[in-house]
Each structure stands twice: as C-alpha cells, then as structure tokens.
Image (cartoon, grey):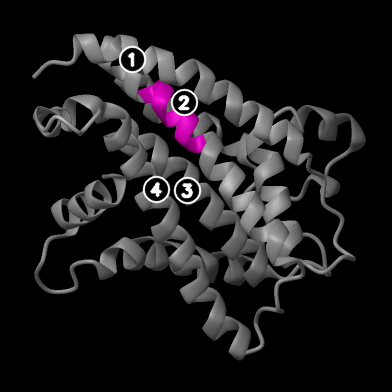
Amino acid sequence: MVSALMIREAVGRYGHENLGFFWVIGEPLLLTTGVMALWSFTHVSHDASVGVVPFALTGYSMLTLWRQIVFRSLHGMRYGAALTFHANVKYLDILLARSLLETVGIMAAFVVAYLPLYLLGALPLPNDPLLLFGGWLLMAWFCAGFGLLIAALTELSDILERFIHPVMYLTLPLTGAFYMVDWMPLKIQKYLLMSPLVHGIEMFRAGVFPPSVVTHYDPYFLALCALLTTGIGFPLMLYAQRHVEL
C-alpha cells in the first residue's frame, strides 16, 4: 500500500511526461549540486582535513531531507483526504509514503552526485557505509516523526502553518549543516549536541569523512528523539484526523 502511494505521489508531483520520475532524484540533485558548487567557491570548510565538496554534499543533503519532509507534512492529511475513501488507505500510510519518497529520492540524489565526484577524485570512498546509512535512516525516522506532529498540528490550527516557515529558518543553526561540532568551543558544543539534528548529520559525516576527522554523535540519543516524536505525533495524528476538512 505504501509503495503504491509513493508511486502515486511521485506521479502526481512530477507527472508522466518529459523527465517525470527523474525529478524525484533530479530536484534534490540539482539543489545539492548548486549549493555544493557555491560552498566550494566560498571555501566554507574551516578545517584542512575536511574537504569542501564532501562537507557541502553531506550538509546540504541532510538539510534537504529535514526541510522537505517537514514542508511536505504541512496540511498533509487534508491534501490526502480524498485517498482515504479507499478502505485500505489510512492517513498514516499517506504521510509515511511522502516521507519515504523524500528519504529515498534525496539519498538517491546523494549517491548519484557522489559517484562521479569520487571518480573525479573530489570525494574519497565512504569511511564507514554502515554509519552513513545508519545516520541517514535515523535522521529520516526523526524527520518523519516530526512530520507527523506538523501534519497533525497544522490540521488542528491553520494559524500554525504561518509559523512553520520562519521556525524552520531559525532551526538552521541547529542542523549542523554549516559547521562541525568539533570546530566549536567546548562550552558551545554541549548545547549544540542537545539538537538531534546535529547528531544525525555528524553520524552521517562520520560515515563519509576519514577517521582523522573528529565527529560527535550519539545514535541512541537520536533514536530516542525519533521515538519520542513518533510516540507523540502518532496519537496526535489519530486525534487530528477527526478534524480533517474534506
């Protein structure tokens, strides 16, 4: 059921004609490549052992995952209400399909960008693929759980939607996309590590960067935060579905 909804979402979003399904990968790929090129010219990295290209690619891929899942969850129940007339389709299936589509599409874009850059010598082989994919999946779980919260809250109050966009901009320093925790003073590090987003991106980068690059993350903390958002978001979604405007 979820896979069928993913295909329907992709077709509805990008259409059958022209590049069609390519845009599931192509849209995040173009955005990531553009930002990566910009960061390369501006020399964002502050550590000689951290290449600008892998720093930009890992940072913006994770940032895109976070933003896309959250924004696709805005009024996600209302926009998918027509599908619930099918007996087997639930609101959870619709929201899960959207989150999975973003998770798979952005990871595919990451891989498609990574391979040619590796062949050109701009990127090394991943240091630890298990950490790379583990960090990605934990981050996707956290984002999906947070997406359930956003879908439910925006269904219960239209006013909240107006606050989501500015709040998402305010979360940018909490994502860890633009810095490594180890670059920061010790007093600041402990506050940054209160953000589950930082743990996700540091773990993801630990899977790409060589062991000489110091990363700070706790997968158990990230999993706990993901479980918490899901545990709150799921029952709230069940309550909010009674108030969906058809």
- Near mark 3 (Cα within 10 A), the count class, few <14, some 14-19 or many ≥20, is many
Separation (CA) of disc 4 from disc 1: 20 Å
| Residue 244: percent from left, percent from top | 18, 15
Specify which label sits upstream in the sequence, 2 or 3.
3
Quarter placement of the C terminus: top left
| Residue 234: percent from left, percent from top | 42, 20
- Near mark 1 (Cα within 10 A), the count class, few <14, some 14-19 or many ≥20, is some
Where residue 226 sits, quadrant-wise, is top right
Specify which label sits upstream in the sequence, 3 or 1.
3
**Label disc, if present, on residue 167 of the rendered structure:** 2
Looking at the image, is mark 1 or mark 2 nearer the viewer? 1
Q: The residue under label 3 is which amino acid type?
A: Leu
Looking at the image, is mark 4 or mark 2 nearer the viewer? 4
Q: State the residue at coordinates (53%, 85%).
A: 116
Specify which label sits upstream in the sequence, 4 or 1.
4
Where residue 218 sits, quadrant-wise, is top right
Looking at the image, is mark 2 or mark 3 nearer the viewer? 3
Residue 192, compared with residue 149, is above or below; it is below
Instruction: Report whether 8 appears left or right of 114.
Output: left
Specify which label sits upstream in the sequence, 4 or 2.
4
Residue 124, compared with residue 163, is above or below; it is below
Dot 4: element: helix
Q: Which residue is mark 3?
A: 65
Separation (CA) of disc 3 from disc 4: 10 Å
Residue 230, compared with residue 138, is above or below; it is above
Instruction: Tell me where the magenta segment starts and ends, as one range.
Output: 143-150
Q: Which residue is mark 1?
A: 238
Q: Which residue is mark 4?
A: 100
